[in-house]
Image (cartoon, rainbow, N blue to C red):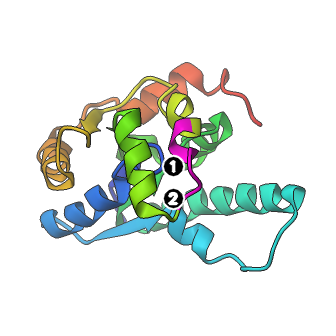
Amino acid sequence: MTTGRIIFLNGTSSSGKSSIARELLDLLDDGVFFHLAVDDFNAMRTKRELGPEELDAALRRTRTGFHRAIAAMAVAGNDIVVDHVLSEPWRLRDCLDVLPAESVLFVGVHCPLGELTRRERVRGDRPPGLAALQYDQVHRHGLYDLECDTGTLSPRACAERIRDFLPHRPHPTAFTRLRERDLGALPVS
């Protein structure tokens, strides 16, 4: 069985990852793609109020399980569009540990901070300032196969760039190079 392709969209909250993923599902016609979003995994959790420590532990388990679900889907031969926020170093480290690195097209989804703030206000479903808190963390690793800016390009235009780039993804991939460069240096917690 061939490992499925993983298009991994990383960006702050409200950067446009989910919109790009939906466009990709409409555009990609050389396989069957699934959109796996960390927000969807979070939404499956119980709705009862959790204390800070319990919430932190639950969120870590959720993200750890999310990474393994991505890997399991890909190893089973499924093509995946991942929508994630790598705002803590351990998240990238865990992804580097469990995902098949040569199957990952790592896409940085950027957006200017002012536009992120505006989008959060319009959406109203995120804590104000969440994107600003994530802004300096999400792209800190500094290495992608492809980058898109949703401040200047529409989700459709970003998806078209990704679709057109997919057959030409580099070898080694950014995930492979990050694994070789940083795996030992990234903090575990």
Tell me which segment is drawn in magenta. 126-132
Instruction: Report the residue at 46% width, 47% height from top.
Output: 100
Q: Nearer the viewer, residue 162 or 101?
A: 162
Q: Quadrant of residue 81?
A: bottom left
Q: What residue sits right under mark 1 in the picture?
A: 99
Q: Position of residue 139 (x, y in %)?
A: 47, 30
Residue at horizontal 26%, vertical 37%? 149
- Mark 2 in CB contact with mark 1 (< 8 angstroms): yes
> Residue at the location (25% across, 38% down)?
148
Q: Position of residue 33 (x, y in %)?
A: 29, 68
Is 165 above or below relative to 17?
A: above
Query: Count of labels shown?
Result: 2
Residue 20 in view: yes
Classify 23 as above or below 111. below
In the image, which disc is placed on residue 11?
Answer: none
**Relative depth, front residue between 11 and 151:** 151
Mark 2 surroundings: few (<14), some (14-19) or many (≥20) residues within 10 A: many
Indicate the position of residue 22 as horizontal and vertical percent values: 27, 66
Q: Secondary structure at mark 1?
A: loop
Q: Classify residue 7 as left or right of residue 42.
A: left
Provide the residue designation for mark 2.
71
Residue depicted at x 38% and y 47%: 118
For the residue pair 111 and 2, the one nearer the viewer reads as 111
